[in-house]
Amino acid sequence: MKKIFLNTVLALLTLLSQAQEKVNLNDLWVKYKFYPKTAGSFNAMNDGIFYTDIEEVEKENTVCKYELKTGKKVGEIVRQSKIMFANKPINLTTYEFSPNEDKLLLHEGMENVYRRSPKANYFIYDLKTAKVTQLDANGKQMFPHFSPDGKKVAYVRENNLYIKTLETDAITAVTSDGKWNEIKNGWADWVYEEEFSKADYLDWSADSKYLAFVKFDERQVKEYSMDVYTGNLYPEKNTFKYPKAGENNSIVSVHTFEVSTGKSKLLDTGDEIDLYIPRIQYTNDANVLCVQRMNRLQNKIELLFINSQTGSSKTVLTEEAKTYIDVHDNLTFVGNKGFIWSCEQDDYNHLYYYDLNGQLINRITSGNWDVIEFKGFDEKTNTVYYSSTENGVINRDVYSIQLNGKNKLRLSKQDGTTDAEFTKGFKYYVSSYSNANTPPVYELYSSNGKLIKVLEDNAKLRDTLKPYQFSKKEFFKFKTSEDIELNGFMIKPPDFDSNKKYPVYMYAYNGPGSNECNNAWDAFEMPWHQLLAQNGYIVVCVDGRGTFGRGRVFKHSTYLQLGKLEVIDQLEVAKYLGQQSYVDKTRIGFQGWSYGGYMASLMITKGADLIKTAIAVAPVTNWKYYDNIYTERFMRKPQDNKSGYEDNSPVNYAKKLKGNFLLIHGSADDNVHYQNSMEFAKELIKYNKPFEFMTYPNKNHGISGGLTRLHIYSKIFNFVKEKL
């Protein structure tokens, strides 16, 4: 009887094992089977009580109105068939309300110039008259901005700035000197857009009388060209301005345009021209523009208050550092009393409240943890909302606190990663929560933390995941030989046996101010890593020095020597893993993309005795080839830090390569240029080092589109199976 029972149990276990489904690349990159749903394209209305969303009604897209508290539909705003221009309906997939919600801004034919600068044909639909107006018939537009009174729209077309008056349809040219690769008005140059994460540089005064903008004079910036393979006899050239480390930047200037007179004024931002203007923003005083001025080394930032009428300027706040200062969007004005600002002056990133003369009123937050994101300020209740790492570096929690720094309240309900988006008026917020092994849940809360309703729980995705039996992502801490504690995670094969030895697939990014070891659902990396685990690989990721959430000292430790400490940390992780009884120390590999690709290139060369196989996608291989804002922020200019540049560039270690190396790059990468991989390939060939090289024609830094991601991950997977 015992034998029969045992055989039955074994048979059942075998059936269960066979029932487990395996992740495949088609599920990942064609079906996107494991990608979670979000709460939708929900637009909270000005009253903070209702919201709008697009719903299909009688087979046509319709902007519908709902009650926030209950989710109940209370009416329709407009159907697509009602929005007609030139006898054709305008595509209704996204929209934006005017400030007083009597008009909709719509677009068609959108195309990206760079990552954050799309252009399209924009239209304005008047909800009262049902009239459709084309914003500008003379070419596609960029960055349409309603004036606060809703009567005008400012926008960029062909490098010039324009204002359309909606009552008369009159278009006013604010500038006329715009020209491709020479002058840009209201639109950032490539490097600002990429490294300051902002493409539109225009802002209306609160009374709609002034439009402030930044002019970028690119004429002294050197050009970079990429071949574009179109199928024609000769390739086309894409040529654009790209300032590499140590090279000339755009000369920037700040201007205001007075609508009533049609006159522009050049504002006084000082005599120095080799500087940055990372942000402009009107204060609550309609005449006063706040300009953020930063030096070329990016270790000093100043807030200038400039009067739009007189042009007079005063420096209100100065922040300096021995290393660098991060640019952020946390500047928030508190009525006409003061402003909220974040900085790392006490070695951790915190929020501070200053008066309009730049005198500190009080600290808002404090502690040995970082504020990650400022979420907003409710003037009615004097409440500040933010997210932080107070509950551990791998977690993110949302908090509320009074402007005076008292009555802090944790709004997050459980450990993991919680984010929040507050509605106008701060009556409600949409919370998104996930952890490393649980897909996100979106819920609507009142501002005091009371749950109103679940918007999306991703129950369908959780059901989809069940038969795949994903291995748990397990977090661990690792201490280096310098007694520095690092955070990491490990994913083991589902049939893991501690008595066996497994190959290890290490993965990292490790760039300054980044994190990969987060207690959050990773929609793309998680299923990819599960595929590797199901094929017998242990997946390991560790955040080394230079990553964020642990204070200024840890994050800034890599200053002037990018790649040095990060590689030391990752190689020590590899050594540690090789000492584990369940790891085959002769089969440790490393893969990374972008900065991670840079790391992979160093790991297989500097760490040639430890790393058997590496895959580098779109890597920087010599910092002198990368843009100046990013590179100089952490390394200064090449002429001022020769050893920092040379000592940690993969091109200088090509001769040390021993293992299996796969190098991948997109030929149209406007960010990390294809030049990086070509120069590295030249060095590898020079020393007769065998490696594999895959180029993706016309693909940018993301290497995506169509079946491209399926192709690239198939290439990586097959290389891992064969070489690791």
Image: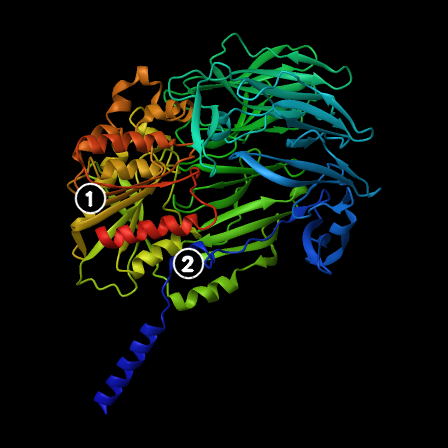
Q: Amino acid at mark 2?
A: Asn
Q: Is residue 262 left or right of residue 538?
A: right
| Residue 196 image offset from top left, x and y in percent | 49, 28
Question: Which picture quadrant has residue 553?
Answer: top left
Separation of marks 2 and 1 at Cα, in angstroms: 29 Å
Q: Earlier in the sequence, mark 2 or mark 1?
A: 2
Q: Amino acid at mark 1?
A: Ile
Q: 250 and 506: which one is in front?
A: 250
Residue 277 seen? yes
Could you tell me which secondary element the residue under label 2 belongs to? Answer: helix
| Residue 276 image offset from top left, x and y in percent | 49, 19
Q: 418 and 294: which one is in front?
A: 294
- Mark number for residue 88? none
Residues packed near mark 2 inside 10 Å, few (<14), some (14 to 19) or many (20 plus): some
Q: Is residue 21 left or right of residue 218?
A: left
Could you tell me which secondary element the residue under label 1 belongs to? Answer: loop
Q: Comparing marks 2 and 1, which lies closer to the viewer? A: 2
Q: 109 and 153: which one is in front?
A: 109
Question: Which picture quadrant has residue 679?
Answer: top left
Locate the N terminus by quadrant: bottom left
- In the picture as drawn, the residue positioned furthest to the top comes out as 271
Residue 621 seen? no
Q: Is residue 28 left or right of residue 409?
A: left
- In the picture as drawn, the residue positioned furthest to the bottom comes out as 1
Which residue carries the number 2 mark?
A: 26
- Mark number for residue 611? 1
Task: Examine the rendered structure and indicate whether residue 468 appears above or below residue 668.
Answer: below
Residues packed near mark 1 inside 10 Å, few (<14), some (14 to 19) or many (20 plus): many
| Residue 357 image offset from top left, x and y in percent | 59, 17
Q: Which residue is depicted at the point 54% across and 9% down?
A: 270
Task: Examine the rendered structure and indicate whether residue 618 appears above or below residue 207.
Answer: below
